[in-house]
Amino acid sequence: MFYRSILFFGMCAAVFGAQTEIHGMIIDRDGDMNANRQPGSSLGTLKKLDKSNNAVVAEYDSGKARVEVFKTGIVHLTIQRGSVSRKSFAVIESPEELSSRKIGIEKEKVSVSLDEGTVSYLPSTLGFSFFPKNGSSPLDLTEIQFDDSGFVAIFDIHGARNFYGLGEKTSPYNKYGSRATMWNSDFPAYSVKLDPLYESIPFILKADPNGTYGLFFDNTFRSTFDVGASDSNKLLYRTEGGAFELYLITGKNAAEVVQRFSELTGEMPMPPVWALGYQQSRWSYYPEQKVLDLAHGFRERNIPCDVIYLDINYMDGYKCFTWSPKDFPTPKEMLDTLHELGFRVVTIIDPGIKDEKGYQVYDSGLKEDVFVKKPDEEYFVGQVWPGDCAFPDFLNQKTRKWWGDQYKSLLDYGVDGFWNDMNEPSVFNTPNKTFPLDVMHRLDVDEGAEGEEHGANITAEHSEIHNIYGMQMARATREGLERLEPNKRPLVLTRANYAGGQRYAAIWTGDNFASYAHLKLALVMFLNIGVSGQPFVGSDVGGFIGNPGAELFTRWLELGAFSPFFRTHSVINSSQREPWAFDSESTKTNREIINRRYELLPEIYTAFRKASDDGLPIARPLYLDFPGEEEAYKISDEFLFGKNLLVAPVLDSGVVARKVYFPKGTWISIRDRRSFDAGWHEVDAPIGKTPVFVRDGTIIFTQSLVQSTSEQADTLILQVFGDRTARGDSHFDDGGSISYKDGDFLDMSLSYESGARGAVLTFGSKGNYRPRYKFLAVELTAQSVKRIAVMKTRDRGEFRGEISNTGNGSVRFTFPFSTEVESISIK
Ligand code: MIG
């Protein structure tokens, strides 16, 4: 163990050295970008121009371009010289049949008319432009230069200054003025400025009060973005291979653009409800007894928790799909006990398969021929935790099937979910810390290039596959779990990913630090990852490397409670990091924070259900909901959680108050029902008391406390924020199966109206699922109406509510629970 941690920190040091080199490389390569070349000259003269229904194809001496109205609001431009165009790994939609009048050719110019503006393509120069109708900044592809391997595309952004997205990137929040590289990389202990990190999403969103568009560069090779950094009016995109595949996504506001991008690349599937609970991890909890002690530790202290993670030490010599006979001699019994205590267990699985004859997984992998090979047809062998390893080639169906099947043994033991790490892929002993770039991958036949013979042995080099290796591993994992347990929703967590990877797994932001700078960065990352199509995101609470003090841990826990993925995790040899590991005062505070996450679960679950449908983030930047407000584009330390909660966490040390920007409307504090008008206000924020506000006119769905989601809460609590009218809705289902897709859900919608003669809360519902609460409670802040409340049901007549005080500035009426409720009148 000692040796391993030395090795680990040795790696960190080695990696820091590479940082400037990487930036240096980008700067060097940018040097020749402004070479004075005629646009279009790279492809030679135009030979032919053809229009089909939704597309125009231009053929040149040495290449081809194609403009297509892909879907409403989305234009797909492909320019290729030599390189082939592959089937996308990100885009799952096929072009829609749209009216052919949307695209036309006039005087050698292709024009596309969209609701939000016009797109034009000039075949003679390869010029591509978007002119928004509302007069906001146009976008011009002014140059595209091909070189031996890839190309650089240069856009004029015409004064646009707000850019977001690009997935998992370090600061700044607004990407204008920065550079970013897409190359999945494992940098243990990354700095707040390091780039690139573990996942690549080449999607950038331009959004300001005047207008918006999104650009998705669907290319998996190493690529770089320079967003006004080298030239203040230019966006430069360079890639080291492949075709130019651009999706221009328009929309009436940023939310519509993000939604369309999510539709294009697929939405996050609904996770099981337990994955929304609090999760405890470290590298590593072992042996068995320590894991059980941990579980009892939560239950004895009444701190809710749903999931315990087993990091690499549960395995036998770090061999995937094995248990350490010494430390986990009776995994089945351990898992049974944990399940009885209401816990789920997630185990880590890395891609490296130990190169060892007699190890069953390795032997079967050899037999099935699933491992990646070098050009000389020898297996590529690289070192990771188990020592020398072979690596599955997740790029083809056969390997994915084989990989998915491996999970059967862990499922049989009772493991509930899986955590795919090291899948950038990370390799300890190669110069580039990953596979050599000429390692070969075998692709599915239908993923071959256009024109390639079907059934041919289609291969691609690692340089092209690198950025999707992790995504395809997560895909193989998910597909396997869905095959093995078809009626269960899997939880897959992955470190590496690519655009569209939200279809397969949640992500966390990797090996960060226990510092306030990293706490701030975590939120900035969530917001940008969210608008890049991936809603299910979280960070290691407390920071992976180092030891947070009690205050930093609690502040991070506060952010964690409003992160879609809520997990504490820390490096090997770190100090204890359980919510009770500090002092008794902070144990109490930490418990309250986790309790509140559990009380808000119906609201959070509904937010997930929405995100799985519309693809919009769960932790969302203010500009998505308030596109007209200038401030909404600048604020990176406040966000909406779901559509109803405004969260303003404290992200600095020694602070007990902060300034909060309130967008239009009136906002009511969840803690004491104080209300705030739009604009800036100072609010108090003592440790553990996260400033959270609900928009006036909203009903939120909460529930009484449970210790895990395997427990049924007694009471569904409807909290009405606002004195006159309010609306709310919530989604319920069994939380774990996929039968909600067949109508087994309940969508409840509420409307509240208050007038001189009292108030009425009216219930609507859809679907046939019946939640099993015992009580239904309504909480109101209204001063005038708090004496008597009567519930009318369709099946059991009327009930009079029992009144109580909540201590948070509202009054509660409690009734027996019924889904047959029609209304509640309050006088
Ligand atoms: O080389 O499994 O980011 O969460 O604890 C380190 C051990 C490998 C990196 C992950 C981290 C995990 C650790 N892993």
Image: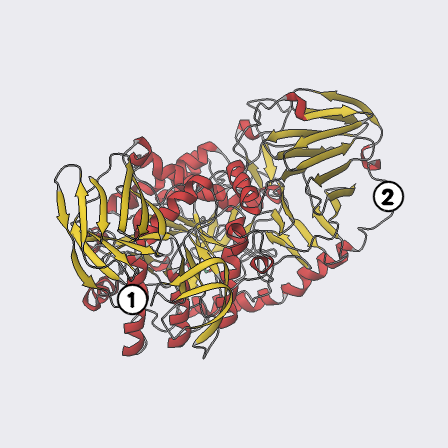
Amino acid type, callout 1: Gly
Count of all numbered marks drawn on residues in the image: 2
- The image's mark for residue 37 is 2
Quarter in which the C terminus is drawn: bottom left
Considering depth in this image, is 289 or 338 the residue closer to the camera? Answer: 338
Outermost residue toward the front in this view: 756
- The local crowd at label 1, few if under 14, some if 14 to 19, many if 20 or more residues have their Cα within 10 Å, is some
Q: Is mark 1 within 8 Å of ligand 1?
A: no
Residue beneath disc 1: 809
Quarter of image, ligand 1: bottom left
Amino acid type, callout 2: Arg
Badge 2 vs badge 1, beta-carbon distance below 8 Å: no
Identify the residue at horizontal 42%, vertical 60% (top origin): 667
Identify the residue at horizontal 72%, vertical 50% (top origin): 235
Q: CA distance from mark 2 to mark 1?
A: 68 Å
What percent of the width, then of the height, locates residue 728?
35, 47
What percent of the width, then of the height, locates residue 14?
58, 66
**Helix, strand or loop at disc 1?**
loop
| Residue 21, quarter of picture | bottom right
Identify the residue at horizontal 49%, vertical 65% (top origin): 512
The answer to whether any part of residue 431 appears in the image is yes
What percent of the width, then of the height, locates residue 327?
27, 60
Q: Is mark 2 within 8 Å of ligand 1?
A: no
For discs 2 and 1, the disc positioned in front in the rendered view:
1
